[in-house]
Image (tube, rainbow, N blue to C red):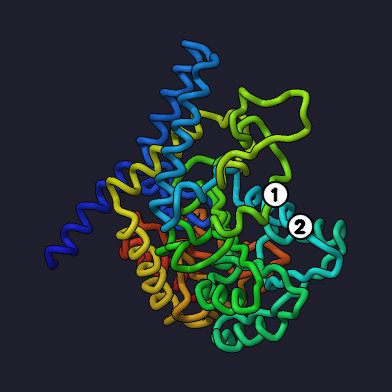
Amino acid sequence: MDSQAASDKEKIKAIREQMPATTDVHYLNTGTNGPLPKVAVDAMQQEIEKEFREGRYLPFIKQLYADMDIVRNYLAHMLGASYDEIALTQSTTEGMNIILWGLPWKPGDEVITTNMEHPAGLAPLALIKSRYGIVAKYVDVPYGEKYDEERFLLDVEQMITAKTRLLMVSHVSFSTGLTFPLKKITELCHAHNVSVLVDGAQGAGAIPVNLHELGVDFYAFTGRKWLCGPEGLGALYVSKKKISEVDPTFISPSSIRDRHDLDICSPYVIPAPFAARYQIATAINKPILMGFQKSLEYLSEHVGIEWITSRIPHLARYVRKLIGNLPGIELITPAGTEAGFVHFHVKGWDPKDLCDILNKKKFMVRPVPKPHLPTPARISTGFYNTKEELELLTEALSELID
């Protein structure tokens, strides 16, 4: 064993001790919820106890906003953005809604999206389509060996017209595991004056993300998946160049400037600077906020985001190679596009039944729910997983196939 492998082995051992959920089971479902590190749980418990013992009163707000800013700075640093471009939300879904409802639509405006999107984007798109009379166009994206990047980009370009305002796409498809070529998509769309909204729920924390380099206009993501935070917090990136184009749909004291100097007899407000104007919550749940802050601190300062985002896809490619050699396996995730996912079918097996049996064997994998075709089984590889775990999973699959 070389020195790097030995070092990684010790590092993974320490990580798994910090994340006990990864030792009780083979934790292969980060794409749904990541495991919580102990420091995050401790921070949440301490904050709850503090509020219970000492109460919650007005000076608490000042410290709350300071802690929100710490979280925004961590996220900006992780994702190659500016602090001013990050707004805290409750979820990816909230971030997608903020953009889709905030753009000034006109009847006949067009939105292009794909047939591989999550309801977090499709549901608000359906509402604005009916309310504003816009047109939604759907690019059919093949999976497995049928996917061709050049063909996909050509299909997108052929759909763009003078009325196209927005392209909505996932960074990583939750339903097939495909990592979309965001930089190429953005360059193509910007050449036609089309903005790009990204569902980044399965990208942020799983693979390297530099939002300024990618050039996307909007990027919504959650804290509970690959960033290993508690449920109830996410974030939205809005490029400074685009902030003037997106009006807040909901507004609160936290999303206006100089809240205590507000002219209460005037119907006008000055929004908070840059992306802060999209922060709806007047008071975020502080225990959750502190848990997320400690998760980000742990990933950034103790584990290393570069190490995390290189290891996760490396493990995905490793398990793909392992299970791809088994008879009756159809790989759904296109080769070379893996982020933290490998999606697959086993001939003769319903994905839900297959996952139920694997779950009982303590392999925490899941099926993609209907009607999201091709409804495969899904493996999520976390930075805390080991190759030995993936080999054991392959053995378990082999026994079921036999």
Local crowd size for mark 2, using a 10 Å CA cut-off: few (<14), some (14–19), many (≥20): few
Q: Residue furthest top?
A: 54
Q: Is residue 93 left or right of residue 366?
A: right
Amino acid at the residue labelled 1: Asp
Q: Is residue 267 visible?
A: yes
In three-dimensional space, the C-alpha distance between marks 2 and 1, rounded to whole angstroms, equals 8 Å
Residue designated by label 2 = 104
Residue at 49 percent of width and 64 percent of height: 379
Residue 246 image point, x, y percent? 67, 53
Secondary structure beneath label 2: loop
Q: Which mark is residue 49?
A: none
Secondary structure beneath label 1: loop
Residue at 72 percent of width and 52 percent of height: 102
Query: Would you say the residues marked 2 and 1 are in contact, meaning their CB atoms lie under 8 Å apart?
Result: yes
Residue 211 image point, x, y percent? 47, 62
Residue designated by label 1 = 247
Amino acid at the residue labelled 2: Pro
Local crowd size for mark 1, using a 10 Å CA cut-off: few (<14), some (14–19), many (≥20): some
Residue 256 image point, x, y percent? 63, 35
Q: Is residue 152 above or below residue 205?
A: below
Location of residue 148 by image quarter: bottom right
Q: Nearer the viewer, residue 26 or 180?
A: 180
Q: Is residue 153 above or below residue 267?
A: below
Q: Is residue 380 above or below residue 275?
A: below
Q: Is residue 367 left or right of residue 111?
A: left
Q: Is residue 190 above or below residue 219?
A: below
Residue at 44 percent of width and 40 percent of height: 71
